[in-house]
């Protein structure tokens, strides 16, 4: 991917034409399809943010994904770094702080490219705001051992070339469910993360 393609994505993502609802619906688990539109009142939902961090490595673009620790509602899932907002901070600040805490993402000079479509998570009662950012800073990731099991460095062009969409079975706190996922080299990404990444994929087309 070259700079002109990236600029085209930024322009499209910031002109109020995001394909969020369509993208989210395609990858939503069965019980989410009927709840795809947010409720009128989200005041009882906690705010959170995640970071889709594009960075350069060996003259290619990469982004990190993490496998979360087994504990908690979303334990063991593949996700973007991010977490809960604290002290009424700006949500972009939340995403950057959480990425630094979870994987030692270097803040350095960060370029905010786009705010992707937010979504809500009924099971944990969170709203999630994804941010697409870019840095030329070299990254030296270190996992936060209490929260992150594995860090995956995903080469963007390879991801776009080799991901597939399929359905698979996943273990949840309510039992096994069959849900859509993005399968990238046997890394199965489902739930909110697949919904967010699917919007990003649509922007890349």
Image (cartoon, helix red, strand yellow):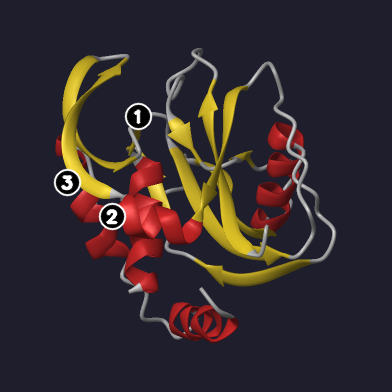
Asked if 41 appears above or below 148 in the picture, the reply is below
- State the residue position of label 1: 123
Residue 167 at what x, y percent from top left?
A: 15, 36
Question: Measuring 32% from the left and 14% from the top, which residue is drawn there?
Answer: 173
Tell me the distance, in whole angstroms, between the alpha carbons under discs 3 and 2: 9 Å
Tell which of 25 and 169 is nearer to you: 169
- State the residue position of label 3: 33
SS type, badge 1: loop
Question: Measuring 35% from the left and 29% from the top, which residue is drawn there?
Answer: 123
- Earlier in the chain: of badge 1 and badge 3, it is 3
| Other residues around mark 2 within 10 Å, as few (<14) / some (14–19) / many (≥20) | many
Task: Describe residue 149's horizontal placement relative to residue 199 as left or right.
Answer: right
Which tag is nearer the camera, tag 3 or tag 2?
2
Tell which of 68 and 139 is nearer to you: 139
Asked if 201 appears above or below 49 in the picture, the reply is below
Task: Describe residue 65's horizontal placement relative to residue 87 as left or right.
Answer: left
Residue 51 at what x, y percent from top left?
A: 59, 51
- State the residue position of label 2: 24
SS type, badge 2: helix
**Residue 97, can we see it?**
yes
Tell me the distance, in whole angstroms, between the alpha carbons under discs 1 and 2: 16 Å
Question: Measuring 69% from the left and 42% from the top, which residue is drawn there?
Answer: 99
Residue 168 at what x, y percent from top left?
A: 18, 30
Tell me the distance, in whole angstroms, between the alpha carbons under discs 1 and 3: 14 Å
Residue 78 at what x, y percent from top left?
A: 44, 32
């Amino acid at each position: 991917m070259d700079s002109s393609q990236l600029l085209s994505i930024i322009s499209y993502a910031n002109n109020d034409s995001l394909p969020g609802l369509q993208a989210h619906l395609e990858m939503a688990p069965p019980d989410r399809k009927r709840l795809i539109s947010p409720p009128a009142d989200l005041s009882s939902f906690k705010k959170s943010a995640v970071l889709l961090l594009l960075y350069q490595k060996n003259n290619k673009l990469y982004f990190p994904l993490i496998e979360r620790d087994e504990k908690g509602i979303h334990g063991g899932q593949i996700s973007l770094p991010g977490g809960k907002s604290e002290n009424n901070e700006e949500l972009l600040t939340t995403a950057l702080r959480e990425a630094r805490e979870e994987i030692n993402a270097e803040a350095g000079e960060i370029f905010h490219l786009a705010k992707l479509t937010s979504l809500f998570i009924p099971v944990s009662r969170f709203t999630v705001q994804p941010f697409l950012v870019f840095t030329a800073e070299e990254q030296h990731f270190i996992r936060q051992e209490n929260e992150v099991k594995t860090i995956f460095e995903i080469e963007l062009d390879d991801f776009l070339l080799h991901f597939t969409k399929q359905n698979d079975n996943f273990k949840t706190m309510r039992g096994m469910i069959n849900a859509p996922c993005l399968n990238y080299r046997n890394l199965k990404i489902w739930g909110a993360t697949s919904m967010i990444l699917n919007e990003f994929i649509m922007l890349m087309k």
